[in-house]
Image: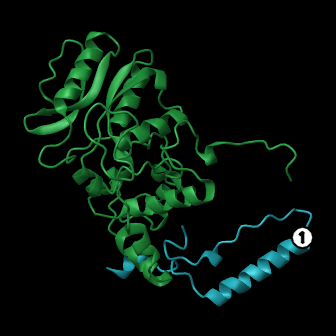
């Protein structure tokens, strides 16, 4: 649905990490942050409604 | 077509098989839902075709739920088209209606209406009048899929920004039966601004249509801003079909896969 609505699917990540796996969680976050930085600002950042005013 | 329906209804009422029949009546030039009871004249019964086939469509299932809640022991009849039938099947699986308390009087939609509704199955399982029309394929989803990501985004946002939060879409939807609607919850969708937060509002509705939307098209008809809601929900339905092989309302008795928890023995 994200792709259908024009939002890059890579902006959503669902992963399962056990609370005992702290280093894995950190790794998950860091790689996700990298993906997001490369994607650039989300189109949802600006308030689309104000654009038209 | 109307005469056959009237005869069927007359018989059902006279033999006491149903306490009342929920259909449509034309009064003073307006078509509205009407509960015909024993002894009532069926003269003003119509099928919702004033100037064109189906120009007066109503989500009769919705009113049936209210009637059923008020009189849970009685059996009622209801006029059903293909979409209504899908709706009933789905409402049964969601326990909103009891199939033992509902008698359907089906009519098949004419081709003209099937085309206008882009209906995949413009006839109920059993019907007393009308002829089966050809299923109509829908292109609106493919048309959006063909756009580039950023074009898709602006396409949808340009549509959603017209929303005036009239709740017409959920008010008319036969599958919207929740008393506590997420869209009316201040914590989820902030109140006091128009248009509402987009795309949150419409996507929330789309997510709630998973396993419920029967593709009747009433939402898009009702929307005063002409937002192509149906395209959004058709996409949701196609995902359900692809991923779970689930077609809402068509596979009788099958509950939504999101509504079922199955314990699978011996599987990792």
Task: Work out whether residue B246 or residue A30 is closer to the camera in this orientation and state it.
Answer: B246
User: Element at badge 1?
Assistant: helix
| Residue at the extreme top of the image, as rendered | B15
Q: Position of residue B210 (x, y in %)?
A: 53, 52
Q: Which residue is mark 1?
A: A22
Query: What is the quadrant of residue B127 in the picture?
Result: top left
Q: Residue at x 15, y 49 (%)?
A: B52
Task: Count neighbours of disc 1 (C-alpha within 10 A) and say few if under 14, some if 14 to 19, many if 20 or more.
Answer: few
User: Color of chain B here?
Assistant: green
Q: Is residue B46 shown left or right of residue B103?
A: left
Residue A47 visible from this viewpoint:
no
Determine whether B148 is above or below B13 in the image: below
Q: Quadrant of the N terminus of chain B?
A: top left
The chain letter under disc 1 is A
Q: Position of residue B59 (x, y in %)?
A: 33, 40
User: Color of chain A here?
Assistant: cyan
Q: Is residue B135 shown left or right of residue B49?
A: right
Q: Residue at x 34, y 47 (%)?
A: B122
Task: Work out whether residue B128 or residue B73 is closer to the camera in this orientation and state it.
Answer: B128
Residue A43 visible from this viewpoint:
yes
Q: Position of residue A37 (x, y in %)?
A: 67, 87
Q: Is residue B6 shown left or right of residue B216?
A: left
Query: What is the quadrant of residue A1 in the picture?
Result: bottom right
| Residue at the extreme right of the image, as rendered | A20
The structure's colour scheme is by chain
Determine whether A9 is above or below B115 in the image: below
Determine whether A27 is above or below B115 in the image: below
| Residue at the extreme left of the image, as rendered | B28
């Amino acid at each position: 649905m994200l792709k259908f609505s024009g939002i890059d699917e890579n902006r959503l990540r669902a992963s399962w990490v056990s609370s005992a796996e702290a280093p894995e969680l950190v790794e998950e976050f860091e790689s996700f942050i990298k993906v997001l930085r490369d994607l650039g600002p989300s189109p949802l950042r600006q308030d689309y409604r104000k654009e038209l005013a | 077509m109307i005469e056959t329906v009237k005869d069927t209804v007359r018989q059902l009422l006279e033999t006491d098989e149903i306490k009342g029949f929920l259909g449509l009546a034309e009064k003073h030039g307006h078509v509205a839902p009407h509960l015909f009871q024993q002894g009532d004249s069926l003269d003003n019964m119509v099928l919702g075709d004033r100037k064109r086939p189906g120009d007066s469509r109503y989500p009769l299932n919705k009113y049936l739920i209210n009637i059923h809640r008020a009189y849970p022991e009685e059996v009622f009849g209801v006029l059903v088209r293909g979409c209504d039938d899908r709706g009933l099947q789905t409402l049964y699986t969601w326990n909103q209606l009891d199939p033992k308390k509902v008698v359907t009087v089906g009519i098949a939609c004419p081709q003209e209406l099937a085309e206008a509704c882009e209906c995949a199955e413009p006839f109920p399982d059993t019907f007393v009048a009308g002829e089966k029309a050809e299923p109509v394929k829908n292109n609106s989803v493919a048309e959006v899929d063909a756009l580039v990501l950023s074009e898709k985004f602006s396409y949808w946002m340009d549509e959603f920004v017209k929303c005036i939060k009239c709740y017409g879409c959920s008010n008319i939807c036969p599958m919207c039966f929740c008393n506590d609607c997420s869209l009316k919850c201040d914590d989820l969708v902030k109140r006091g601004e128009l248009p509402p937060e987009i795309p949150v509002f419409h996507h929330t509705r789309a997510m709630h249509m998973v396993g419920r939307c029967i593709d009747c098209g009433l939402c898009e008809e009702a929307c005063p801003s002409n937002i192509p809601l149906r395209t959004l929900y058709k996409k949701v339905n196609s995902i359900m079909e692809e991923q779970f092989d689930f077609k809402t309302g068509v596979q009788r008795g099958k509950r939504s896969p999101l509504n079922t928890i199955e314990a699978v023995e011996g599987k990792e």
